[in-house]
Image (spheres, helix red, strand yellow):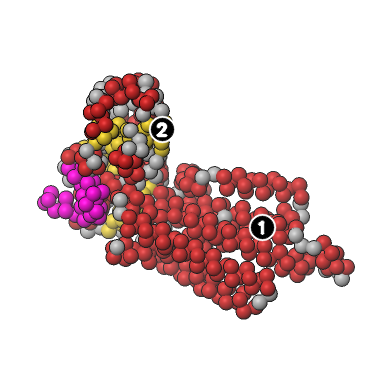
Amino acid sequence: MREQLALLPEYLTAHLQLTLIALLAGFLISLPTGVWVSRRPRAEQLILGAAGVIQTIPSLALLAVMVPLLALVGGWTESALGAQLSSIGFLPAILALSVYSLLPMLRNTVTGIAGVDATLIEAARAVGMTPRQRLARVELPLAAPVIVAGIRTATVWVVGTATLSTPVGATSLGNYIFSGLQTRNFNAVLVGCVAAAALALLLDGLIRLLERGVAARRAKLIAGSVVILAALYLFAGVTLLAGRGGSDSRPEVRIGAKTFTEQYILSELLALQIERRTGLASRAISSLGSTVAFDALRAGEIDLYVDYSGTIWATLMGRETEGESRGEVLRQVERFVAGQHGLAVLGTLGFENAYALAMRSDRAAALGLETITDLARVSGELEIGGDYEFFGRAEWRALERVYGLRFRAQRSMDSSLMYEALVAGDVDAISAFSTDGRIAAYELSLLDDDRRVIPPYDAIILVRAGLLEERPEVAAAVRELSGRIDQQTMQRLNLAVDRDKETPAAVAARFLERLR
């Protein structure tokens, strides 16, 4: 717990920055747009409808789509203006959160102005007020309680949604939750959830005071809440500028990591290896979405990360998953990333982490199942669980087609929870990862892919090509790890985190010491 609390100032400050800046941007868009719409009834349905449609988009999808969008726009701004936009981290998170905050503030602005007594507007017109004066002196003051209520709703939404900024590379309290769920560190999850709830209650309470002050026209309440909010904005602004100003003070190697235990360990391993061999600072950018990590590498937002040959082969290259040898997949993946994306494969770590269908050993034995062909015969009576992306991947479609798998039900869930669901008997099979330490810990059996449908999944070190020229010493340091981690070793490293509750950094450090 002490280790988690030590991270709290950084994560909470970053979360506050995201929340306050997104709310301010959303308010600056919503207020004038709401005023404009209130004067044009025909536009009201269109504008509010568009805001409502945006609100129906899953927040994680909205955040994720900002990454390739900013990478595309960043390429244009770099060629036209000489400035490239950051496609991961703070910017995509702010844009998505700002858009997500619009609906309640926009709708309440329109509703508040529409609710102003028409006789008061006529009285203002009768005494000679111009439309601008009527807006500033009559309509907005009377609509203010409703508008502030919209801000209050948006605030709670944004605080909660900001925890989902982690997969696009933005630091937030979501770092606790994503890493904690994957590594089964419930202290981290608890700290993240409690801190997010406390921040939401604090901001909601401040805006509630502002709402009461505006409604009752109590100057002290208004002034007090405004002063505290202004202080929070000042703190967020100063810390944000200080962080931006000091981020490039010395060379730094940025290492990406996806959202599961193995990736956290490997990113720490690469960081330690680079620091020890080169003296350069390194920083792990963790819990990135799979395609987000690849896009970030292409855009130069990260310098390297560990990916898997089968992921690139099936997801990015769109190839058939069955029929190719391990060596041929590797060769074609190397040509693909170099020729089409300007990336390089520094080497393979020495193990595969492939998808595999797993069952409890006692359950598989009772049903007489050893292969996926065996499973197919009884799949109609069983339920299967998979991680978020498995049932949309080419591998799953190939498994269904080749083996004729037809399960009674398919359940998508967080990858850290599907093992628990299998052990508890809530599902009969899962899409496991072959190097997961929980396979041995939970006495699970991997069913043999007897028709070789699932492609090879060699762990490969992907780097942006420019790194090889800019910092050849980094490439040399990383190449020292090629072939040094076998399947059993990776399983033990994963198990040390998932079962024994060690930190990924500690596990990585101990492994490096043994290599020396």
Asked if disc 1 and disc 2 are in contact, CB closer than 8 Å, the reply is no
Question: Residue 337: x and y, percent?
Answer: 34, 36
Quarter where residue 353 is shown = top left
Magenta part of the protein: which range? 489-516
Q: Nearer the viewer, residue 99 or 12?
A: 12
Crowding near the residue tagged with mark 2, few <14, some 14–19, many ≥20 C-alpha atoms within 10 Å: some
Question: Residue 145: x and y, percent?
Answer: 67, 66
Q: Is residue 481 magenta?
A: no
| CA gap, disc 1 and disc 2 | 41 Å
First in residue order: circle 1 vs circle 2 = 1
Residue at point 33%, 23% (across, down): 378
Question: Of the residues shown, which amino acid type is indicated by label 2?
Answer: Gln
Q: Secondary structure at mark 1?
A: helix
Q: Quadrant of the N terminus?
A: bottom left
Question: Of the residues shown, which amino acid type is indicated by label 1?
Answer: Asn
- 58 on left or right of 405: right
Quarter where residue 339 is shown = top left
* Residue topped by disc 1: 108
Q: Is residue 476 above or below residue 335?
A: below
Q: How many marks?
A: 2
Question: Residue 29: x and y, percent?
Answer: 62, 57
Q: Is residue 340 above or below residue 22?
A: above
Q: Nearer the viewer, mark 1 or mark 2?
A: 2
Q: Is residue 506 magenta?
A: yes
Residue at point 62%, 62% (across, down): 149
Question: Residue 463: x and y, percent?
Answer: 30, 44
